[in-house]
Image: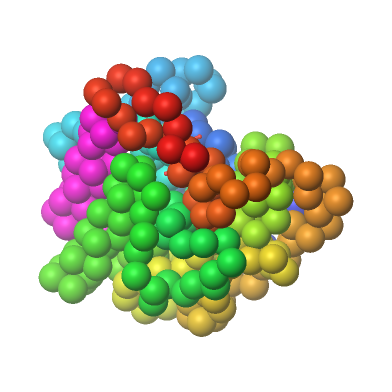
């Protein structure tokens, strides 16, 4: 039986590919597809996360510069999924996403890595209203520490291409879930199916001479907020799925009308924080 997420027989032009965040939701979706496309796929994540999932990978904390340098040895390309994936206080985001992405690019520069596909996020632009349509050329408007950390990763991608020629595709992923369904009304705009995720990552690795590119990562949702077709065309990504078919099931699942979570593209992330200390969020702002 052919897996629904199988991108086809096109092999990727890399000998060794590294997948960070391999034990996470999206890492586990991507692993079988990527394994079929390269001679060597290196999986990495935090040690306990690998152990919990029974994954045979290289344990590495992205905040550990020496560990990341060792991890990148001999790596031609990286799919960088690892890091904190939600809004929380600054300190853990600083370690995993800011130090972590810096360590990754520095290690990639030393190792001669050619391309990084960076899991950025829709939360880089989460403060735009849901009534607006935006493109990758519009100014970033992060909705929290998490979105700002992804913007920092995008800035490093730009820097390391301009200075050192390492190519980066920043994928501002919308909403991709373990059960492969849009969870609520907002996701009718932001949903990315697992099969389209595989297609998008594969295209981002395979496209010739991308230089530095930012693309939103969603399926062919008619309610989308993003004009991102030019970037998709550069990559050769053509989404095959759409959240539209789930509309009647999730239309009613929405935050209270008039709340920031209902108004802004970042949704419920707008209701998290501010943080009075490094441990606990204060009452939501919505
Ligand atoms: P996830 O939270 O399931 O996976 C992230 C993985 O990173 C985890 O396995 C975790 O152990 C690992 N990690 C965390 N801190 C680390 C550190 N210091 N060193 C090494 N590894 C560390 O997240 P998911 O959903 O798989 O997302 C993958 C990536 O895509 C994340 O970077 C996330 O920010 C991004 N993204 C995901 C979206 C989604 O809808 N799932 C939407 C937008 C962006
Ligand atoms: C993200 O960036 C998160 O990693 C993911 O868990 C979802 O919350 C997603 O954005 C979203 O906005 O739906």
Percent position (x, y) of residue 147? 37, 49
Quarter of the rendered image showing ligand 1: top left
Percent position (x, y) of residue 209? 37, 78
At horizontal 45% and vertical 55% (from top left) the residue drawn is 126
At horizontal 30% and vertical 20% (from top left) the residue drawn is 279
109 in magenta:
yes
Left or right: 30 with respect to 22? right
Residue 116 picture quarter: bottom left
Residue 60 shows in this picture = no
Picture layout, residue 22 above or below residue 232 = above
The secondary structure that dominates the magenta segment is helix
Left or right: 85 with respect to 189? left
At horizontal 64% and vertical 72% (from top left) the residue drawn is 238
Picture layout, residue 229 above or below residue 81 = below
Instruction: Out of 147 and 231, give the one closest to the viewer.
Output: 147
252 in magenta:
no
Left or right: 273 with respect to 5? left
Percent position (x, y) of residue 193? 67, 53
Residue 37 picture quarter: bottom right
Left or right: 109 with respect to 272? left
Picture layout, residue 174 above or below residue 51 = below
Residue 123 shows in this picture = yes
At horizontal 49% and vertical 31% (from top left) the residue drawn is 23
Tell me, what colour scheme is on the image? Answer: rainbow
Write the start and end of the magenta stretch as one range. Answer: 89-113
């Amino acid at each position: 039986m052919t897996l629904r997420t199988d991108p086809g027989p096109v092999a990727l032009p890399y000998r060794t590919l590294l997948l960070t965040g391999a034990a996470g939701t999206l890492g586990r979706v991507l692993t079988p597809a990527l394994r079929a496309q390269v001679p060597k796929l290196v999986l990495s994540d935090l040690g306990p996360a690998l152990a919990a999932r029974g994954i045979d990978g290289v344990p590495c904390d992205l905040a550990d510069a020496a560990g990341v340098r060792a991890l990148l040895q001999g790596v031609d390309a990286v799919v960088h999924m690892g890091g904190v994936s939600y809004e929380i206080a600054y300190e853990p985001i600083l370690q995993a996403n800011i130090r972590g992405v810096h360590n990754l690019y520095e290690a990639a520069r030393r190792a001669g890595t050619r391309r990084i596909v960076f899991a950025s996020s829709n939360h880089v632009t989460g403060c735009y209203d849901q009534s607006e349509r935006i493109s990758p050329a519009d100014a970033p408007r992060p909705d929290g520490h998490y979105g700002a950390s992804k913007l920092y990763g995008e800035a490093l991608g730009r820097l390391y291409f301009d200075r050192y020629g390492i190519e980066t595709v920043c994928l501002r992923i919308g909403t991709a879930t373990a059960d492969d369904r849009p969870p609520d009304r907002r996701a009718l705009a932001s949903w990315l199916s697992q099969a389209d995720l595989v297609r998008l990552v594969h295209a981002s690795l395979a496209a010739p001479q991308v230089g530095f590119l930012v693309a939103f990562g969603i399926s062919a949702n008619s309610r989308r907020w993003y004009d991102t077709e030019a970037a998709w065309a550069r990559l050769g990504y053509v989404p095959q799925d759409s959240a539209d078919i789930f509309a009647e099931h999730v239309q009613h699942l929405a935050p209270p009308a008039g709340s920031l979570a209902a108004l802004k593209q970042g949704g419920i992330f707008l209701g998290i924080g501010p943080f009075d200390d490094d441990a606990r969020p204060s009452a939501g702002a919505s």
